[in-house]
Each structure stands twice: as structure tokens, then as C-alpha cells.
Image (cartoon, rainbow, N blue to C red):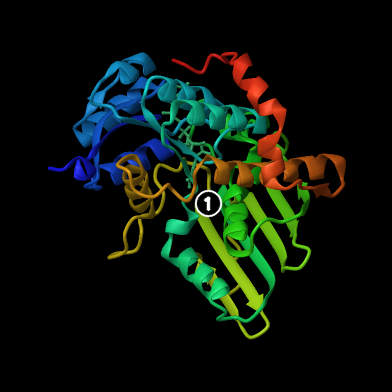
Amino acid sequence: MSEESRPVGLAIIGAGLMGSQHATSASACPEITLVGIHAAESTQSKALAEHHGCHQFGSVADVLRDDRVEAVLVATPTDTHDELAALAMASGKHAFVEKPVTRTLDDALVLRSVARSTGRVLGVGHVIRYFAEYRAIHAAVTGGDIGTPAVATFGRRCQQPDWSPDGWHTDMARSGGVAVDMLVHDVDLARWCFGEPTAVHARVVGSDRHGGLDYALATLVYEDGPIVHLHGSWAEPEGFSQSAEVCGSTGMVSYDSRGRDELVVTPHASNTGVTALPPPPAGREDPFQSQLRDFAGAIRGGPAMPSDIDWAIGSLRIALAMLESSDTRDVVELEPLGALFDREAAASLVAAGATKGAVR
Ligand SMILES: NC(=O)c1ccc[n+]([C@@H]2O[C@H](COP(=O)([O-])OP(=O)(O)OC[C@H]3O[C@@H](n4cnc5c(N)ncnc54)[C@H](O)[C@@H]3O)[C@@H](O)[C@H]2O)c1
């Protein structure tokens, strides 16, 4: 077997919703060998490792000292991503981090510096472009099928996330609420289809009120482009759905995973916990597996992942601008992304390197 085709040895840190998803996708991916799983919640990692017939690591240190592990996939709460991924790269491993890349922009800039100084591949889980439906929307918009795009409405809705034992999702300081945790996907789609917006205006309920229910409504401003309107909800009665619609000068393209066309009133189910994302329709490749294939390819010398750290920072800063706009009740202007990367602050933050105690 040539070096280029040798499967990448992967360890997953985190065994909740996304750790489970990635373990399933990695197990089915010929470009990956799932070596093992670690999670702070050891009952979760034990069950998941047993299910996939791989090793249960007892600690992050055990993961990092295992020579079979070439890459570490971080699927833990958002505020722990930076430290775990930085440690992995500093230990010589490649890293893949779930979206949003980090909870704060400063943490993301530090991670960017670590990736550059270690020369490791750092992929980020912006999975939108691996969904067939979103690919079709992107192709229609950029291929001229609907003429000049004029208005876009992108949204995603989920029941209040209650599946984590420590409730980190609804802690704004840890997750950023629905604007950062969910709408970062739709920001991603908007940037992919239309490029960089110049300003953001948003109103956000905030998951630290109303018992964890949350709602965010944002407008991305494009000076010479479409009106882009994003809405995200953690107030659904149950389950998850996503939708996108773009109207242009000659047509409209739309997608709605709910597939409903009649008025339906649904009472809230008692939240019993989401344990898995909906499987892809029969015959369609799992988008998370396609994403892992790109990650493995980048490690083996193929093209860089489209969602590298620079891309992820571009999406994170817009999601964070939604929170700022909602707090200040004002429009937030966005500086060009290149200017952000040039700022001296990034380098000095690397030197600081303070630990936040995420390593367990
Ligand atoms: N790409 C997507 O569509 C998508 C969907 C949902 C969540 N996410 C993202 O995935 C990440 C994980 O979300 P989730 O819903 O799976 O969370 P979760 O609460 O279900 O699982 C978190 C896991 O991390 C473990 N953990 C927590 N802190 C740890 C630490 N310091 N060291 C080791 N293990 C630790 C927990 O024990 C648990 O196994 C978040 O960043 C979230 O925003 C992405």
C-alpha cells in the first residue's frame, strides 16, 4: 500500500452526539482507521468504543502518546476545542475540530497560529458543503440558474438541546447559543454562495433566558449583492430541520428538510434527548464521511480542506457579530478578513498560551 493510500489513524475526543456521528462515519470511511475514543464522560466513550470495536482511551494524554493515532478529531463542547486541538497539534497530530471552531475569536486566532507553527493539518467541521441539497443550491446560484441572486433566506431549527449531562449547549458562555452554535452553518452557506458580507444586524433571544429556548434572526449586508436573512431556533417542539431559499432575477431555488406544505400545530414533546442526527437518505453518501475523506486526503498530501482554519474564522466572526449586534442594538461592520489575520494581537496571544483546564 502506498503512503498516499494508507488509512489515517484517527482518535475521537468526545462521545456525545457528534462524537457518535463521527465514529459511525469514520468506521465506514476507507481512508480512516478508527483507533479509539476518549471522553470526559467515560460511560459514553466505553459504550461507543465497544460499539465500534476500537480502543477506549482513559485520558487525552493516552490519546496523544499513541503512535497509531495520526489525527485527533475534537467533538467536545465548543469552549474546549482550542485547548484540545492545540495540544494535539503540539504533540505532532493533525486535528479536526467540530464547528464552531472555538467559542471566541481570540481562541481561534491562537489555534491558527499553532497550526501554522506546527505545520499540522487543521480541518474544521463546516459540513454544509458536503450535503447534496446545499451543493445543488450552490451550483444553481453560482451557475446562473436563477439569474442574479436578490434575496436569500437560510434557516435551521432544533428542539432545545438537552442531551448533554452538563447542559453546556444552553450556557451562552460555553456555546454562544443558537446564533453561534447553529447559524454558523448558514453563515457558511452565505459566504460560499455570495462571498464576504460587509456588515451584520441581528436580534438574538439568548439561551440563558426562557429556560434554554433560543431564537436568532440576522441580516447579512452585501453592498452589491443579495439581502441575506438567517434564522435559527432552539425552540422547536422536537427534532431538527433545515431550509434554504434563494430568489434571483430569473428564478428561485429552495430546499426544506421538513417537506411540509400544510399548516401544522405541534405541541412540545417532553424533551427526551436527541441521540443521533437523521441518517442520510438511502443511497446518498453520508456528508460527514465525505468531509472525513477530504481531511484524510489533506493529511496524505492532497488538496487542503475547503473548511480550513481561515475559513472557519471567517464564519465564526460573523456569528459572533450577531451576538454583538443584538447586545448593542446596532449594525456591526466587518473589517476585511485579511486585515483581521494581519493584526499583531494574534501573535501575542500565542505567546500567552494560558491553559483553561479543558484537558481531562
Ligand atoms: N456539525 C454539526 O452539524 C454539529 C451538530 C451538533 C453539534 N456540533 C458541534 O459538535 C461539538 C460537540 O457537540 P455535541 O452535541 O456532540 O456535545 P455532547 O455534549 O453531546 O458531547 C460532548 C462530549 O465531549 C466530552 N467532553 C466534554 N469535555 C471534555 C474534555 N475536556 N475532554 C474530553 N472530553 C470531553 C463529553 O464527555 C461528551 O462525550 C460542539 O462544538 C457542537 O457545536 C456540530
Residue position for label 1: 238
Is residue 205 at all visible to an observer of this figure? no
Using the image, determine if residue 143 lies above or below residue 65. Answer: below
Using the image, determine if residue 346 lies above or below residue 183. Answer: above
Q: Amino acid at mark 1?
A: Glu
Residue 262: x, y in percent?
57, 75
Q: Nearer the viewer, residue 172 or 75?
A: 75
- The structure residue drawn at horizontal position 51% and vertical position 65%, both measured from the top left corner, is 258
Residue 18, image quadrant: top left
Is residue 72 at all visible to an observer of this figure? yes
Q: Nearer the viewer, residue 357 or 162?
A: 357
Residue 119, image quadrant: top left
- The structure residue drawn at horizontal position 56% and vertical position 51%, both measured from the top left corner, is 185
Residue 71: x, y in percent?
34, 31
Residue 151, image quadrant: bottom right
- The structure residue drawn at horizontal position 54% and vertical position 37%, both measured from the top left corner, is 101
Residue 52: x, y in percent?
22, 36
